[in-house]
Amino acid sequence: MNKRTVIRRSRTPLALLATGGLAAALTATSIAPASAVTGSASHPKPTVVLVHGAFADSTSWNDVIKKLKHEGYPVMAAANPLRGLSSDSAYLKDVLAGIKGPIVLAGHSYGGAVISNAATGNENVKALVYIAAFVPDKGESALDLAGKFPGSTLGKALRPAPVTNPDGTRGTDLYIQEEKFRHQFAADAPRNTTDLMAATQRPVTEAALAEGSSEPAWKTIPSWDLVATQDRNIPLKAQTFMAERAGAHTVEVKASHAASVSHPDKVTEIIEDAARTVR
């Protein structure tokens, strides 16, 4: 299909990832009751599924969840294991299989690679939304894309930690050093918020970031992309390149990598833009 990239620039100032229905419920941070689904009986609102990325958890979507639920959307924030792209995507695919009706699937950062793989073959996923995210093509990894253009300062901010994998092999977990977390990840969010985020951050394995993507869903499912222009993890040029290649409906926002925390209004807006196209 032919899709046209449309860029809007924010004018507002900085303010600041089991099977079946049971698994879906257990992995949800928040899911609205059926009574919250508004709209006509023939066209209920789609379920919005939110997938966090590396160095974060589902609470990074809290303010977005509040706004979406206020507008009557059923919402789920899935727990992304952050262990490997293929296994994380398979996990999310099982979660999605437990949801009835149309789905708008949103991913932040590494979560963008996960949703790109997990949505493939699921006819219920009607729209993909990328928030300061990786949008890989087949064979590309997050590390490939982060290094495609200059500008990322993530490497120098990382703290590696040895870890034993489930199969007994050794691997490496990656954290952002706590003292560098706010500057690197969420410079436009309040310090009391980023202090908590730094302490509760979820590590990602080095292998997950290095694993290549399978055939991505954005080639067949319409996509939207919020590009964070002040991102120190994924350079602006890399985000713009990926959004344009995917033919995404694109919005640029003057925000850090943690746009869902610092600009939940803009993140909610682009998700709702995608959701309104679902019939």
Image (cartoon, rainbow, N blue to C red):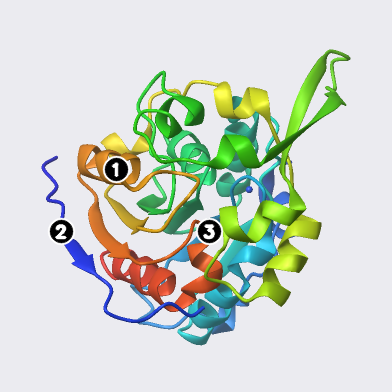
Q: Name the front one of labels 1 and 2.
A: 1
Earlier sequence position, callout 2 versus callout 3: 2
Q: Which residue is mark 2?
A: 6
Which quadrant would the C terminus be assigned to in this image?
bottom left
Q: Which image quadrant for residue 137? A: top left
Q: Is residue 181 positioned above or below 189 on the image?
A: above
- The residue carrying pointer 2 sits among few (fewer than 14), some (14 to 19) or many (20 or more) residues within 10 Å by Cα, namely some
- Which amino acid, mark 3? Val
Residue most extreme to the top: 169
| Callout 1 amino acid | Lys
For residue 229, side relative to residue 171 (left or right): left
- Kind of element beneath mark 2: loop
Which residue position is annotated with label 3? 49
The amino acid at mark 2 is Val
The structure residue drawn at horizontal position 88% and vertical position 14%, both measured from the top left corner, is 168
Name which residue lies at 55% across and 21% down: 211
Classify 10 Å Cα crowding around label 3: few (below 14), some (14-19), many (20 and above).
Answer: many
The numbered mark at residue 180 is none
Contact (Cβ within 8 Å) of mark 1 with mark 2: no
Distance, label 1 to label 2, CA atoms, is 16 Å
Q: For the residue labelled by badge 3, is the local secondary structure a helix, a strand or a loop?
A: strand
Nearer-N-terminus badge (1/2): 2
Q: Position of residue 53 (x, y in %)?
A: 59, 48
- Where does the image place residue 112, in percent across and percent down from the top left? 47, 44
Q: Which residue is mark 1?
A: 237
